[in-house]
Image: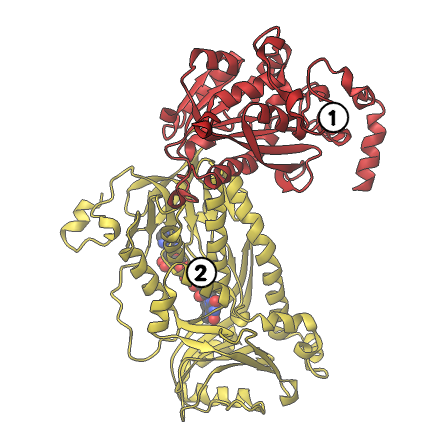
Amino acid sequence: MFAPKLAGRVPRGRVGGLRCLATHAHYDIVIAGGGLVGCAMAAACQSSPVLQSKSVLVLENGPDRPYHLPEDYGNRVIALNNSTRDLFQHIHVWAPLTASRMKTVHGMHVWEATPESLLTFQSDQPDRGHFYILENDLVVHTLSQKIRQSPGHVRVVFDSGLKSGQYNQARGQMDLALSDGRSVSTSLLIGADGVNSTVRKSMTRQQYLSRNYHQFGVVGLLSLAEPIPNNMAWQKFLPGGPVALLPLSETRSSLVWTLPSHQAQNMLKSPPAVVLAALQEALRPYPVVSDPFPRFSQLSQLAGFPLGLGHASRYCAPGQVLIGDAAHRVHPLAGQGVNLGFGDVRALVRALETSVLNGERFATYRSLLAYETDRQRYNVPMMLGIDFLQKIYGSQNPVVAAARNFGLGVVQAHPSVQKLLASFAN
Amino acid sequence: MLTTVCVLSALARRFPRPWARNLSTRDDASPSSTTPNEDKFKFDPHLWSTSTSFNADEVDKFRAMAQSWWDPQGPCQPLHSMNTLRVSLVRQGLLQTGLIPEDQAQTGRDLTGLRILDVGCGGGLLSEPLARLGATVTGLDAAEENIRIAQEHAHQDEAIRERLTYEACTAEDFCQRNPEVQFDAVVASEVIEHVDQQPLFVHTCSQLVRERGSLFFTTLNRTQESYLAGIVAAEYVLRLLPRGTHDWQKFVQPEELEGWLNAAGCRTRSVQGMVYMPVFNTWHWIPVNRVNYALHAVKEPALTSFID
Ligand SMILES: Cc1cc2nc3c(=O)[nH]c(=O)nc-3n(C[C@H](O)[C@H](O)[C@H](O)COP(=O)(O)OP(=O)(O)OC[C@H]3O[C@@H](n4cnc5c(N)ncnc54)[C@H](O)[C@@H]3O)c2cc1C
């Protein structure tokens, strides 16, 4: 029960006036995972005139950390595309994010070993950016603030995760066991619980295709030697993997550098100044364009994340559905990761709304299948494309490496590769 | 597509081809001409030997199907998926005619406060979704087995069971017993092609709806295409439905239906074609109404109010 826990601390889950979560409570929707995608899902339910009346419980394993916008930028940033912008406008979080800290990026320069191989992608809509760079924590915070402030039936409980879930055929619902010993039931369990999703693992007939790239994403915060407009993103394809410089402000950029695991681990042990020197060496020759190339004076907040590919063969089972990284994990080189997840949110809301407006029982398997078909048709080709790019650029195989360095390089030669890069975060 | 048509027409030669018969020999007053003609459609109760549209053979067909109404993989699969069209037909129709307040539209509670009669409700496949959208629904079916199934099924969902009433009777019986009762909408989906005395049936439906209320019909057109698609393909080739489910002779042309409705003081607002995709089990609106179609009509206010 929740009560004994309450004795020593402020109640955690308090959205919608929640003081205490009754044992055996029933919710129309339970969202496992209060990360980027789970919070967006909850906010989207609140904003939907059709789903507004549904009771929603968000379960988050982690604690409810107080958030203050730090003076300097964090090292975990995401690139949001214009579809995500549409979703965020729809759920009324775009304006607070714009008012807070966001960088609108006008385009991206991509180059390879030779400066002639430069390609430039730009926004085709004058009033819109090509994509937008935001800090992870700020987005999660803004979304959860939105959930707390909106009237509605969304409750968030922290420090409490989903332990297991089982479909109860007779009652047509999911019976859930929580990590704090309580149990609840729901008509729809949404797995937004990330790469190691408990919901996915509890699905029968699920096959999870995964590949370890033996690569790390090394992230960090770069300070510019002198201020520049810094409106463009830069990405260079190196033999070991791509390195991306994402603008944050006139004096800051974010580093996302894909490296073979052993190299990354060495780098993470080295002093930041050494890493910065290696980065500057790797970026040369700088491309010659009218946009000024940022010169960096400092690198801080270095951290590394293992990279891999993962895809769930099924996004749904009776009474349960997967969204975000729980369903698919991609290489960050195309900036798609979380945008695919937000696309899932839009599609799932649409499928649930349609089914309600057709007078169906809530969250029928048929409506979940409609979501699955809709999303897999989009996500699978995108993932294969990203995987293909990764193979070419991440490969240590000498034959592939030779092919890669032959002539103008693969990026220039392949229209399909260009198309994929043009869609960076789009 | 073309090959399918060829295969279907080849198969069709093995079946009776009723359209080859002279349509004017049809045993009731329904016209062979396709232009609505007020006089022809005028409903005169004295012309009718029995005052019921009930057809015992047709009701027996559905009695036999009763157990499978709610089996999503069973023979009623197309009826389940047809809800995507017919529920939106009712929602959109009642919104356009002003019976649904704007702020209630597209909320999932769209039909709150409305009373709907579902004539020929079968196992309640359409009554339940309408109730789930907030309507108070009365479902009628001549077969008691169907009503029992519908009641049992409704009982499983406490969110809607209060708003659902089922009665085992014909529309005519109901009308006679409840002369004062009028609904905001009357729905007869996939029913009229199974009743005798179709003009009487339409007349009864119109009596059960209030002024400015709506009538919704879905049915099959009487065309060569509907014979191929509705009977040869659905009942013989693809086996979507048990053989003998439909009698092509009873299919109704939209012009005929429109004529009977006119005679009953109802103006047709729309006729839309529908098509079924068997492999995907989905329905779609299409611009041609040669096979399946949906019709929406509105009961005009009585003329007396204008004369006054
Ligand atoms: C180095 C790196 C760089 C990246 N760069 C980009 C980028 O530029 N652009 C981009 O779009 N994407 C990027 N991504 C990917 C992006 O971070 C993810 O796609 C995104 O975080 C997925 O969000 P999510 O909500 O699905 O999962 P997560 O963010 O993983 O959230 C899952 C949440 O669920 C909680 N949880 C887990 N299990 C349970 C449980 N059993 N019960 C309750 N709660 C649980 C966790 O505590 C967590 O809060 C990058 C990823 C990496 C590693």
- The part of the image, by quadrant, that contains residue A205 is top right
Disc 1 marks which amino acid? Answer: Ser
Q: Which numbered circle lies on residue A87?
A: 2
Relative image position of residue B304 (x, y in whole percent): 46, 25
Image coords of residue A28 (percent x, y): 37, 41
Instruction: Name the residue at 37% across, 72% down.
Output: A98
Res A315 visible: yes
Q: Chain B is which colour? A: red
For label 2, being within 8 Å of ligand 1 is answered no
Q: Is mark 1 within 8 Å of ligand 1?
A: no
Mark 1: secondary structure: loop
The chain to which mark 2 is attached is A
**Chain holding disc 1:** B
Chain A tint as drawn = yellow
User: Badge 1: few (under 14), some or many (20 or more) residues near its Cα, within 10 Å?
Assistant: few
Q: Is A388 placed above or below B109 here?
A: below
Q: Amino acid under label 2? A: Leu
Residue B119 visible in this rendered orientation of the protein: no
